[in-house]
């Protein structure tokens, strides 16, 4: 039997994992808090700047865009969360890049199809809702790619235990969005300008997340293994539809 003064071989690994998990929880709370502050700051500004009818159109379109974003992720956030640690755990740099490439293709394809669908059915959308929101919704869907990519890559950063970067980058992107929204509204761009400001902020956040993730991937050094195939990736990510239905029911 080992004495109390002798550590077992796996103790250091377990302790390191526990430390990373504890840090992940703390930075997750910080990330959520900064995200909430950034959202509230933008909302408070828009309430003062927009008329009640315009703000109503904006909040409706924003609500629909949330569900479109959930749809267009195509479960790739969960796929990266599941398979990225496996690939990086064996130091497979090429495999990690291949996984990101496949996820990007899946997200882009669904986003493009959704954007075309919303654009084509604009007259029907306005007719059913009896409101002029379809053009704004179509623009928001096209501009949504950056936000979708940000959401997917945020899960990739969770997979490598990096919530610190998200907690730091989120308020900066929020400040950028707010500043651009102020500039665009004062320049007479209206709601279109607000959506463009949001897209620029999210795209900047996507770029930051991507660079951080690639830096981690480029440090990987190990033996390449079997690639994560399309079937395996999409099968695991297939839970995106139940997630969308649950979000719709709760929302």
Image (cartoon, rainbow, N blue to C red):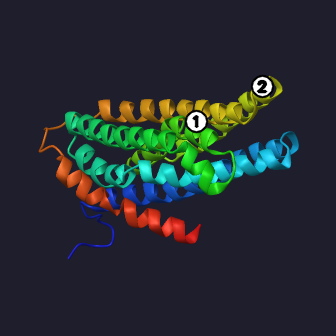
| Residue drawn at x 87%, y 43% as measured from the top left | 48
Q: Position of residue 144 (x, y in %)?
A: 53, 39
Q: Position of residue 64 (x, y in %)?
A: 58, 53
Q: Quadrant of the C terminus?
A: bottom right
Assess disc 2: are there few (<14), some (14-19) or many (≥20) residues with their C-alpha within 10 Å of its C-alpha: some
Residue at mark 2:
183
| Residue drawn at x 75%, y 43% as measured from the top left | 42
31 left or right, relative to 118:
right
41 left or right, relative to 26:
right
Element marked by disc 2: helix
From the viewer's side, name the closer residue of 10 and 157.
157
Q: Earlier in the sequence, mark 2 or mark 1?
A: 1
Residue at mark 1:
139
From the viewer's side, name the closer residue of 120 and 38.
120
168 left or right, relative to 114:
right
Element marked by disc 1: helix
Task: Compute the Cα span from label 2 to label 1.
Answer: 19 Å
């Amino acid at each position: 039997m080992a004495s109390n003064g002798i550590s077992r071989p796996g103790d250091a690994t377990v302790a390191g994992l526990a430390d990373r998990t504890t840090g992940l929880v703390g930075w997750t709370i910080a990330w959520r808090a900064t995200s909430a502050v950034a959202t509230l700051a933008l909302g408070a500004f828009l309430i003062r700047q927009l008329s009640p009818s315009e703000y109503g159109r904006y909040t409706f379109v924003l609500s629909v865009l949330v569900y479109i974003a959930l749809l267009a992720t195509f479960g790739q956030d969960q796929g990266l969360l599941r398979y990225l640690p496996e690939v990086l755990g064996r130091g497979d740099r090429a495999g990690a890049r291949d996984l990101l490439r496949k996820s990007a293709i899946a997200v882009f394809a669904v986003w493009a199809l959704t954007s075309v669908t919303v654009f084509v059915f604009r007259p029907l959308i306005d007719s059913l809702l009896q409101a002029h929101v379809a053009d704004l919704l179509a623009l928001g869907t096209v501009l949504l790619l950056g936000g979708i990519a940000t959401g997917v890559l945020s899960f990739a950063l969770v997979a490598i235990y990096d919530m610190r970067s998200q907690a730091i980058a989120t308020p900066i992107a929020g400040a950028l969005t707010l500043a651009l929204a102020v500039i665009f509204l004062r320049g007479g761009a209206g709601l279109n300008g607000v959506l463009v400001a949001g897209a620029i902020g999210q795209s900047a956040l996507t770029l930051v997340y991507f660079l951080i993730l690639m830096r981690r991937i480029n440090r990987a050094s190990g033996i390449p293994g079997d690639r994560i195939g399309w079937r395996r990736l999409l099968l695991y990510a297939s839970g995106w539809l139940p997630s969308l239905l649950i979000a719709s029911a709760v929302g």
